[in-house]
Image (spheres, grey):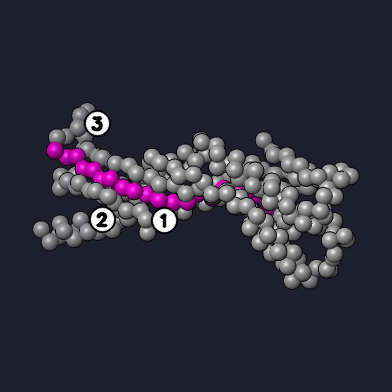
Amino acid sequence: MDEMEEGMGALKAKLGRILTKPKVFIAGLALGGLIVAVLFISIFNNGKAAGAKEATPNTLSPSVVFERIASQNEMVSASQNYTIVDKVTDTKRFFDWFDIPFTENSFWYRYVGTIKAGVNLETAEIHTSKKKLTITMDEPYVISNTPDMKKSGALEERNNILNPIEVKDVTAFEAQCKERSESEAIKDGDLLEEARVNAEANIRAMFNSAFGDEYTVDFDYRK
């Protein structure tokens, strides 16, 4: 009995890392004016620190501003918090013909995390035509999917001595459900659209900070 209790304790500790199928997605969090200000200050301070010749806003060129924006490599422009609650069951089968009676195990789990999306600035390009700037970029994408393990955990567990929950099964389930959470965020479409809108607004704001309304800024996305 002591060995079984130790095994159950180890299993519960492992379950603290489980990802499960999305059931509830909480509305996303837009990153707005603050990120523009922070990025703008960081970009131009970095340019000065690297030994670049200081230039006043009147002598800066769009290409110089763009190079400093693109040097940040990627921009996180949308963030969505989500909560996932799901029940997982497993039953041993006899040669895939039928379920073996009295071998079912199951657990309920709550998984909380944050998905961030944005644009890749490293592959972005700028084209200038008189007073019009066109920024060409790849489509927005998911940058990270980070669990909050302080809020995540097993809600209920029903183990079975005839079919114990194994570590390898939990590990496979983690990977599968992380993919599901991202798939749901992308399928819904709102997160990537929010990332697109916010990225455009942030980049426009940085050009406006350098040149005022001297240039119009448009965006083109690669297919």
Residue, disc 2: 12
Q: Quadrant of residue 108?
A: top left
According to the picture, the residue beneath numbered tag 1 turns out to be: 148
**In the rendered image, which residue does mark 3 sit on?**
96
Q: Main secondary structure of the magenta part?
A: strand
- Mark 1 Cα-neighbour bin, 10 Å: few <14, some 14–19, many ≥20: some
Q: Nearer the viewer, mark 1 or mark 2?
A: 1
The amino acid at mark 3 is: Asp
Give the residue displayed 40% in from the left and 47% down from the top.
83
Q: Is residue 65 left or right of residue 129?
A: left
Horizontal and vertical percent position of residue 66: 77, 54
Mark 1 or mark 3, whichever is nearer to me: 1
Q: CA distance from mark 1 to mark 2?
A: 17 Å
- Residue 106: in magenta span: yes
Tell me where residue 25 appears, x and y as whole percent: 44, 42
Residue positioned 72% across, 67% down in the render: 46
The reply to whether the magenta stretch includes residue 141 is no
Question: How many residues crowd around disc 2 within 10 Å: few (fewer than 14), some, or many (20 or more)?
Answer: some
Please determine whether, in this image, residue 184 is positioned above or below residue 1: above
Q: Which sits earlier in the primary sequence, circle 3 or circle 2?
A: 2
Q: What range is drawn magenta here? A: 102-122
- As helix, strand or loop, the secondary structure at mark 2 comes to helix
Q: On the picture, is 25 further left or further right than 59?
A: left
Q: Which mark is residue 195?
A: none
Judge from the rendering whether residue 121 lies leftward or rightward of residue 101; answer left or right. right
In primary-sequence order, the first of circles 1 and 2 is 2
Are dots 1 and 2 in contact, CB under 8 Å? no
Q: Nearer the viewer, residue 49 or 131?
A: 131
Q: Amino acid at mark 1?
A: Asp
